[in-house]
Image: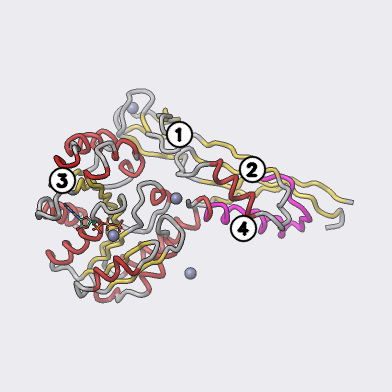
Amino acid sequence: MHQIADVEVAKNIMDANKKLAHKNLHKLEDNGIFCVDFVGAIGSGKTTLVEEIIDNTDYKIGVLAGDVISKFDAGRIEKHNVPVVGLNTGKECHLDAHLVGHGLADLPLDDLDMVIIENVGNLICPVDFELGSHLRIVVVSVTEGDDTVEKHPIIFQTSDVVVINKVDLADAVGADADKMVCDAQKLNPNVKVIKSSLKEGIGLDEIIAAIEEAMNS
Amino acid sequence: MHELSMAQGIINAVLDTAEANNATEVNEVTVEVGRLAMINPEQLQFILGVLIENTIMEDAEINFEEIPAEIKCYDCDFNGEAILDDKDHYAPMVKCPKCDSLNVETLNGKDIVVKNIVIEKPDDA
Ligand SMILES: Nc1nc2c(ncn2[C@@H]2O[C@H](COP(=O)(O)OP(=O)(O)OP(=O)(O)O)[C@@H](O)[C@H]2O)c(=O)[nH]1
Ligand SMILES: [Zn+2]
Ligand SMILES: [Zn+2]
Ligand SMILES: [Zn+2]
Ligand SMILES: [Zn+2]
């Protein structure tokens, strides 16, 4: 004979990631490291921005480069002579705190002041996964279309800084960069929005200043 | 496609609890999905269906309950359920229902929780 039982499970599937994210944050803080994570659309300029920050600041930076196949971005960053770990997601569309934890274990944390995490290019899935960073910056470019911001509200509501990149191409693709700025401010009144052309060196100082402001607060 | 990792998390939680309770079969699973989790229940349902084959939850009925988004408004002090702009159903915009402000903190609605399961077990277990 069998009996039927109703059993409480009460297990939050998001908790495992959250716990690991907090562990990552503690590990970073124990080493006095500030951590920024970049999310954003595919090809929006995340890796370029990481490269520019490395070349234009004096911080000792380590990089975790996430990708479906991680060797591409990691290979680019390696050329800037900083420690970099490629985080291969395989099929997944986002980094999670577990992968970041493994990446941190492979970085020389005693010797760094900043860790930059580049997430997989995706404006949707990374929202569900905290990584343990202090500051989240979302990078989109005008070439994705000037409706990109309003179409993906949550990632803009949950980021601290928005970078609207490739403004040098706005006219060529018929995009209104200012509309994207307004959309972001409407979605997230507390967010800092910066227009940039990393190709022409526009906006980089402002992005670095935003990171430093967060570092010192 | 992170429905795949979510599905795996759900199945592990169900099977762990089922085993701990000596279940021979799982008949029903109830999962709460927050309105702000970037998850499409239909895709989740599909992937779960594939992954539970050949487990004791193979024939289980899986129910999803939607958990509303709860917010706190910094502009008017409203505390409660948010209005969600449903034009993009699984990427809603969070707004204060009282004053329309977007200057809000999300208190609830991001989680995915396996709430309970209905199992069969031998009488003497
Ligand atoms: N015109 C223009 N091109 C840019 C700018 N910033 C980056 N690019 C170019 O855009 C392309 C994509 O840049 P990446 O930095 O690789 O973009 P990403 O976001 O790291 O891409 P994924 O990692 O594949 O998601 C490269 O060819 C860059 O040189 C810019 O401001 N203007
Ligand atoms: Zn990249
Ligand atoms: Zn591991
Ligand atoms: Zn996905
Ligand atoms: Zn309000």
A106 relative to A201 in the view: left or right: right
Q: Nearer the viewer, residue B96 or B29?
A: B29
Q: Nearer the viewer, residue B57 or A88?
A: A88
Mark 1 highlights which residue?
Answer: B89
Mark 2 CB near ligand 4 (8 Å cut): no
Q: Are marks 2 and 1 on the same chain?
A: yes
Which label lies toward us, 2 or 1? 1
User: How far across and down, in percent of the image, does residue B99 sit?
Assistant: 32, 23
The amino acid type of the residue labelled 2 equals: Thr
Mark 3 highlights which residue?
Answer: A169
Q: CA distance from mark 3 to mark 4?
A: 48 Å
Mark found first going from the N terminus, 4 or 2: 4
Q: CA distance from mark 3 to mark 2?
A: 49 Å
Determine whether A192 is above or below B4 in the image. Answer: above
Q: Nearer the viewer, residue A154 or A143?
A: A143
Q: Main secondary structure of the magenta part?
A: helix
Mark found first going from the N terminus, 4 or 1: 4
Label 4: chain? B
Q: CA distance from mark 2 to mark 1?
A: 21 Å
| Quarter of the image where one finds residue A185 | top left
User: How far across and down, in percent of the image, does residue B72 sit?
Assistant: 38, 34
Which label lies toward us, 4 or 1? 1
Label 2: chain? B
Mark 2 highlights which residue?
Answer: B30
